[in-house]
Image (spheres, rainbow, N blue to C red):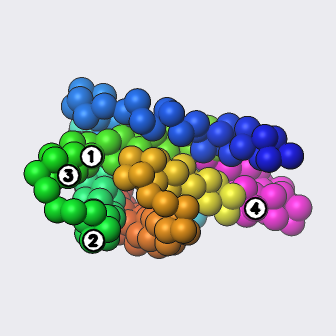
């Protein structure tokens, strides 16, 4: 039974060994930041609850609009990844240092960990993208049919998606910092609420740009 549970967890949150293989090289980090920015912009525009509605029918794409969206995606990508990673990294580092002897080797290890923390956050965004695409089409179908069953299913998928997203990040952080099992719940709570704040801030920033197009 335990083996099946571990297999289930490894499937959705990735195996522990995967996170230990992450490197601090920058190339894929920058590519990932661009991906996160594009993802944020596209899903914001696609959100049927936005005043602009579905971008396919309500936004006229020209060179100016495309340029603004691309620049916005690049900026939002950096803001999203950095604003999540650094505060969470600093909080965990602070408590981790309290439980370890402060020495140069620990400092050097932490200096390379921040890049890996960013990659964990980017990885979680990549993993959840297919699920978010399904939720988008489910939301659109729900609006067109006024189905309460579809609304319930879409809502449940959205909730599960958010927990999944934070679960992937939590497991990655716990592996990178080699945290004990008794603090993993606290890490999940930290990640959960900080992501909620970051998401709200990103939505607000995007609204300032997208609504002007």
At label 3, counting other C-alpha atoms closer than 10 Å, the crowd grade (few under 14, some 14-19, many 20 or more) is few
Residue 110 lies in the magenta-colored region: no
Mark 4 against mark 1, which lies toward the viewer?
Answer: 1
Label 3 and label 4: CA atoms lie apart by 42 Å
In terms of image quadrants, where is residue 148? bottom right
How packed is label 2: few (under 14 Cα within 10 Å), some, or many (20 or more)? few
Residue 113, label in figure: 1
The span picked out in magenta is 132-158
- The residue pinned by badge 4 equals 156
Image coords of residue 142 (percent x, y): 77, 56
- Residue 179 to residue 118: above or below: below
In contact (CB < 8 Å): disc 4 and disc 1: no
Left or right: 78 in relation to 32 = left
Residue designated by label 3: 106
Circle nearer the viewer, 3 or 4: 3
Q: Nearer the viewer, mark 4 or mark 2?
A: 2
Q: CA distance from mark 3 to mark 1?
A: 11 Å
Above/below status of 54 relative to 62:
below
């Amino acid at each position: 039974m335990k083996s099946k549970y571990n297999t289930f967890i490894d499937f959705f949150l990735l195996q522990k060994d995967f996170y230990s293989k992450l490197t601090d090289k920058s190339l894929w980090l920058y590519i990932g930041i661009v991906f996160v920015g594009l993802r944020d912009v596209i899903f914001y525009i696609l959100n049927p609850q936005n005043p602009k509605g579905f971008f396919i029918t309500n936004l006229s794409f020209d060179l100016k609009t495309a340029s603004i969206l691309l620049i916005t995606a690049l900026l939002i990508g950096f803001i999203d990844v950095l604003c999540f990673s650094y505060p969470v990294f600093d909080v965990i580092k602070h408590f981790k240092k309290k439980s370890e002897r402060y020495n140069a080797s620990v400092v050097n290890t932490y200096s390379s960990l921040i890049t890996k923390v960013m990659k964990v956050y980017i990885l979680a965004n990549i993993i959840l993208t297919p699920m978010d695409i399904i939720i988008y089409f489910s939301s659109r179908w729900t609006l067109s049919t006024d189905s309460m069953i579809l609304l319930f299913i879409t809502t449940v998928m959205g909730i599960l998606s958010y927990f999944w997203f934070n679960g992937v990040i939590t497991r990655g952080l716990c592996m990178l910092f080699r945290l004990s099992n008794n603090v993993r719940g606290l890490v999940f709570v930290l990640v959960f609420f900080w992501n909620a704040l970051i998401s709200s801030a990103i939505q607000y920033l995007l609204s300032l740009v997208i609504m002007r197009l």
